[in-house]
Structure formats: C-alpha cells, structure tokens
Amino acid sequence: MEWSTACVDWADRLVAGASIIPPPIFPPQAEQALAIFKELRVVDLPGKPTFGECSEQWVFDFVAVIFGAYDADTGQQLIREYFLLISKKNTKSTIAAGIMLTALILCWREEEEHLILAPTKEVADNSFKPAAGMIRADDELSALFHIQEHVRTITHRVNRASLKVVAADTDTVSGKKSGRILIDEHWLFGKRANADAMFMEATGGQVSRDEGWVIYLTTQSQEPPAGVFKEKLQYYRDVRDGKIVDRKSLGVIYEFPDEMVKAKGYLDPANFYITNPNIGRSVSAVWLEDQLRKQLHKTDGSLQTFLAKHLNVEIGLNLRTDRWPGADFWEAQGIEALTLDQLLRRSEVAVVGIDGGGLDDLLGLAVIGRERKTRRWLLWIHAWAHKIVLERRMEIAPALRDFAADGDLTIVEQPGQDVIEVADIICRVRDARLLPDEKSIGVDPAGIGDVVDELTDPDVSRGFTMEQIIGVSQGWRLSGAIKTTERKIAGKEMVHGGSRLMAWCVGNAKVVPSGNATLITKQISGTAKIDPLMAVFNAVSLMSLNPESNAIDQGFVSL
C-alpha cells in the first residue's frame, strides 16, 4: 500500500488556508475513531459542547490520520510516530486528552496502559483534567471508567485498560509498557539532559505492540531550540520537505514559510491564521493583535516569548533589556563559509584571544584576522568543555551537546587536552605567518596559566615568547574592546562564522553600566556561559592596536 508523509508544498497550503495533514490510509478506521472523538465533551467551554460541535476541520484531520493508519486486518499501525507543532491556545492539551480517551475506548488489549508524559505536574494536569471532565460529562462513560485523581489514572472497568498521566518532574517512567503514548510540551524536554533516556524508558513497551504509536505535541520554544526538541523539530521538517523518506513518521508543523519570517510577515495580523488554525474559536485574533501591539516595543524578551508561543516563530538570540548592544546585529553578520582555513587564507594579520578554562567553564578561543584589501575583521571561534560541565550544569548540557555536534565545541575527557588543542590552533596561525611578533595573543590573566605554560615551556618547544602573550585587563578596562566590537558588528566591519554557540554566548551576555564604562563579566551573566565572547573581546583589544602584517601576499579571494 502506498502513502506518503511528506508535504513539500506545505508553505503554499498554509498561506492558502488548506490542510497540511494527509488523508487517512484506512478511512473506515478513521471514521470509527472520529465518531467517538466527536461525541466527547469539552467541559471548560460554555455549554460543554462536543468536539464535533466546537472543533475546526484540522482537528478531525489530525485524529483521522492517527487512527486511520491502523490496519485492522494485520493489527499493524503503519504510521508509528506523530509530531504536532502548533501555537499556544489552539486547544493542544484538550485535543491530547480527547485523542487518548478515544484510544482507550477503542483499545482491545486487556490491561493495556496508555500514557501521557508531561514535563511538569502543571502540564500533566492540563491533559488529565479535561480527560476526566469528558468522562464525568457522559453517563455512559462514567459507568465504564473509574477515575483516580490522586494518581492521575483512568481505568476501563471491563478490560482494565488504563490511561495514566505522568509528570516527569515528580513521577517515574521506568518500566512502562505503554502501547500508545502522547508526549506533551516536547520543547520543555529539550532542556532536560536525561530526556533521551526518559523517552527510551517510556516507549520501550512498543517493541511488542504492533498497534502502538507515539505523538509529540508542542509549541515553539521561547529560547533557541535545543536537545531532543531541536533534533525532532529538524527531523520532522526534513520528513515534511521530502529530504528524508520515512513513511512511519508524520510531522504536522504550523510555522511561517522562510520568506515570511525573513520579511517579518508574522507581525501582520492578517497572517496570524497561518500558525493558529483555531483562530476564531479558541484563539482570538483581536487578542493576538492587542498583545502584539503591547509587546512590540519591549526589549526584555517579552516580545520574543510572545512570538514563539503565539505565532510559532523560532527564536534566535535571547534579547533582553540588559543585553549587549552588539546582539541586535550579531546574526546578520554571520557567514557560514567562514572557516578557520578561510580566515587564514584571506587575512594579512591575525591575533588570538583566550578566556576561561576552569572545570565549570568553557575554554574559549577566538581568532580575528584582518582581511587583505578590505581590512574587514574576520572572526572564528571554538570552545572546549570538560565533561564534568555536563553533570554540574545539567540545564545547559543539551545545548552544549548540540554545539559539539555542530563542530564548534569539543567536550574533553581529561584536563589538559583542551590546552594542547588550543596551542595547536595558535601554532597553525603562527605557521601561516599571520601572528605579529609582539602582542599577538590576548588572555584573561586569571586562570589561564596552563595555556601560557603550554605555549612558552621550552620543553614543549612551541616556540612562543612572553612578548607575544598579553594579559588583557578585565572589568571596566575591557569597556573599550566591548564598544569597538559593537561598532564593528553594527557597521558590518566584522563578520563571523554564524555558529549557534556564539549566538548563544552573545544572547547570554548581560551588560551593567558603570559610569562611562560598559561591564560584561561572567559574574554578571551568572551560570550562562560567555567565555568564547570574552575571548573575542580579548582578541579585539589586540587587533585594535592595528598590528603590522608579516604575511606573504597570496592574492585576494572573495567568499
């Protein structure tokens, strides 16, 4: 039997208001499930209407494609995994409750467990309470099911099949044998270092259940996507776009087309319907427009949160009122083609900045090259993290693993490995005849002794002298370098490799005015890591001295 889970014309369909959900593979199975689903009552709406009375067509399409992928003749569920990304207040959790209750009513396997896995107790209640309310609102269902609120469980009185709602922050998922699973607010699991292991435990029972499926429901993250959420989001975009052929997985993603994102079309109220298919029902267009107007001029992150949650706009830099001013221009100056090799080939002179290195820190290395002819500054960065950071800073562990996968961060097993690799890169810059004879390596004087020893120790034979290594004063004395970096970025006189690692560090940087100076320190920024950005400022301090070139002219090649 042929079917496809790709939707390559999704952008045109969303703009036209057409469905992006494929038809069910087995219409009779879909119709049976829909007949049940449409009779369930939404108790928190006036008059307690049924789903059939209060839902838009996309809801029925989504329910149909889930239950309509079940082959009753073979007992096989042909599409095993679903991913729904939709804006806040489009009745996501209520629909989740209705889908799982429908599955419980249709379940033929005795003592089968159905599971809703939520990141927190509050999110778990958002699904359990509507499901319990649907049962209480129907005399027939009340007689058929037993509700246990204290353990968030609904049990079929005849075949003892159950629906259990589990909060990951308070309950355990170990040993689950659930056949049908719904994971709510998947974006929050992207912030958990152990999310992969948790999902493996929760879905382990499906190996012996051919009729099983998993549904991931989520809004967009109010921070740059990370961890398991980023991984799933990108995978399902690729399935949707036909880049990956996976007929057992279906992604239903309500997001603005790339062209509209670049043109900021999401700010036009006329386009709100694109990511809000329930607009006019559970979502008020007037309310969205009013809230956007109130948030539009805020710079404390409120606008970004609104765009992510209510319009499904993926967030890049985390902008706040205390942000570094250079953050507003940072992403626009990213050039993916700018590798270290490109920088070395295009530059007439280069300097190095280093910062960090403690076991709880990142060790950041920044190389700034001055481009031949244009004299534009080219920036390349890399960072190292000891594996213990993944344990001590679990809240940022998923992001660090993402940066390592990008190739911009190296996770080291033993202290000293990072120092050796930093020295190796500096030697590459020197061997390209780009380092000035003096003041070529800028370091934070505190906690960077191992790097200095590696570069200058005669027994190691790196061949650097103390004249080349400069301790860059920190605190208010770094204010000049910070402001120079701002001007260079805003004036398009500095470009960088566009790494997510640096965008994250730039977003983490907090600014505190001190007289005429601008302070950005690791103490101000708290547990968020900014070491690679501080390394950039150290390098800027040296490039601002306008060093002379020792390089052999290799010709100018444009990126």
Image (tube, grey):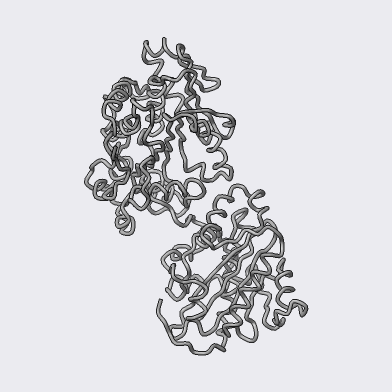
Q: Position of residue 436 (x, y in %)?
A: 61, 85
Q: Nearer the viewer, residue 148 or 251?
A: 251
Q: Can I make out residue 454 in this image?
A: yes
Q: Residue at x 68, y 75 (%)?
A: 471
| Quarter in which the C terminus is drawn | bottom left
**Residue situated in front as seen by the camera: 363 or 429:** 429
Left or right: residue 180 versus residue 197 is: left
Return the x and y of residue 21 as percentages of the image width and height: 29, 39
Above or below residue 239? Residue 147 is above
Q: Considering only vertical position in the picture, is 409 above or below 173?
A: below
Determine whether 308 is above or below 431 in the image. Answer: above
Considering depth in this image, is 371 or 90 the residue closer to the camera? 371
Identified at 33% across, 31% down, the residue is 63
* In the displayed structure image, the side of residue 239 where residue 542 appears, left or right: right
The quadrant of the rendering that contains the N terminus is top left
- The answer to whether residue 87 of the structure is visible from this angle is no
Residue 547 position in % (x across, y down): 57, 85
* Residue drawn at (38%, 30%) of the image: 76
Q: Is residue 434 left or right of residue 134?
A: right
